[in-house]
Amino acid sequence: MGISNHIPFSSPFIIGREIDYIKLAIQNQHLSGNGNFTNKCHDFFSNKYGFKSCLLTSSCTDALEMTALLSKIGPETEVIIPSFTFVSTANAFMLRGARIKFVDSCTNSPNIDLDLVEDVITESTKVLVLVHYAGIACDMSKVEALKRKHNLLVIEDAAHAIDSYYNSQPLGSFGDLATFSFHETKNVICGEGGLLVINNPQLSDRAEILWEKGTNRAAFARNEVNKYSWIDLGSSFLPSELSAAFLFAQLENINLIQSRRIEIWRKYFDRLSPLAQSGYFKIPFLPRYSTVNGHIFYIVCNGEAEREQLRNYLQSHGICAVFHYIPLHSSPFFCSKHDGRELPNSDRFSRCLLRLPLFYEMHNNQIDKVCDRIYQFFH
Ligand SMILES: *Cc1c(COP(=O)(O)O)cnc(C)c1O
C-alpha cells in the first residue's frame, strides 16, 4: 500500500503565515511566553467569543490543572466528571487530592448524563466538569439549574469544542472556567497548546498569578508593581511565543478551517445516514440547541466485535479509523477507588464507537473512499 493511498486519521497542517510569524517572533527577540503573539491570541478569543479573560497555556492538560488549582480543592472535596473522557480531565483534580465521582454518558450521546448528576451530589461536592464530546454541546440549561441549586463551580473541558455554540452562545463562555486544546489532532493547532478561559471575574487575578509561577510578574510587566515576588502557588503554564505565533496564524484562518471541517462532517453524515436508518450503526445525535464544529465524526456500532472487524477492514484498505476513550471509572488506576456504580453507556461508547478520518486537507475522494468501504463492509 503506497503512502499516497493511505488515509490517516488526522494530519497536522499549515494554512497561513505560521512560518512568517515564527520568524517575526525571532526577529523581535522575544521567544519566551507572554509576548506580542500571546496577546494577539488572547485578544482574538476575547473579541470573537466574548470570553472575559484568557490565558494561553502549553496544553489543555495544563489549563485543566489551573482549573483544579483555582477550584481550591481540599482532601474532602468531591468533583463530578464524565467517565468517558481523556485522562487529563480527571488527573488535574486527582493531583490536587480531590475525590472523583465519575458519571455515565447519555444513551444517545457520549456527553455526561446530567440527569444522573444529582444522584452523586453530596455536601462535599464543589465542582462539575463537562466535556462537549465531538464539539456537540451539553444541555447548558440543565447545567445552569444544577449550578444554581447546588452552588457548583462549573468547568467546561472544551478541548473538542472550539467555535461550537449552544443556542448561538459559544461553548467555553458558560463555565466559571473553560479549557481548549491546540494539540495537533484538534481543529486549530500549534503542536502542543491550550487556553484557559476565566469567565468568573473573581478567579481572574489569581489565574494570572498561577500562570506566572505563582508570582505577580504579569502585573510587573504592565508596570502595575515595581518588583515581582512569590505570592501564591503556581507553575510555568505559559507557552513560548513560537507556539503563540503559529497559533495566531491558524486563528486568522479559523473560518476556513471550520467551514471545511464542517463540510467533511456533513458529507459523512449525509452519505452514512441510509446505513444508520437501516440499523447497521448509529450516527451522532444532534440536539436542536447545538451546532456542529466538525471536530470528530463517529459512528456507534452494534457491538465491539463488529466495531473491531470494521476497524480492521478499513485498516486493511489503508484507512485509519480509531476508537476513543477507555472508561476512567474502571481503569487500572481508578477501579479500586470507584464506588461500584455501573456506567453502561460509557462502557458501550468505549466498546462500540469508531472515529472516521477527518482533517483539514482531506480530499472529497478520500471521504468517498471511506464511505464506499463502509458500504462494502456492511453489504
Ligand atoms: C485533547 C484533550 C485534552 C488534552 O489536551 P492537550 O492539549 O493534549 O493537553 C483534554 N481533554 C479532552 C476532552 C481532550 O480531547
Image: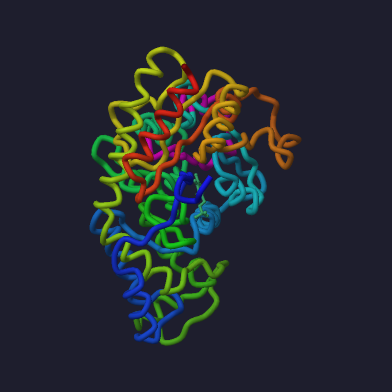
Residue at the top extreme, as displayed: 278
Residue drawn at the location 31% of the way across and 56% of the way down: 52
- Against 159, residue 326 (above or below) is above
Residue 342 visible in image: yes
Q: Quadrant of residue 165?
A: top left
Tell me residue 87's x, y (percent). Answer: 60, 45
Q: Is residue 49 left or right of residue 189?
A: left
Instruction: Name the residue nearer the viewer: 370 or 202.
Output: 370
| Residue sitting at x 46%, y 16% | 379
The spot of residue 208 in percent (x, y) is 44, 67
User: What residue is drawn where x is 40% and y is 30%?
Assistant: 371
Q: Is residue 132 in the magenta section?
A: yes
The residues colored magenta run 113-136
Q: Position of residue 28 (x, y in %)?
A: 35, 85
Q: Residue furthest front?
A: 2
**Residue closest to the eye, 265 or 62:** 265
Q: For this rendering, which residue is in front, 337 or 355?
A: 355
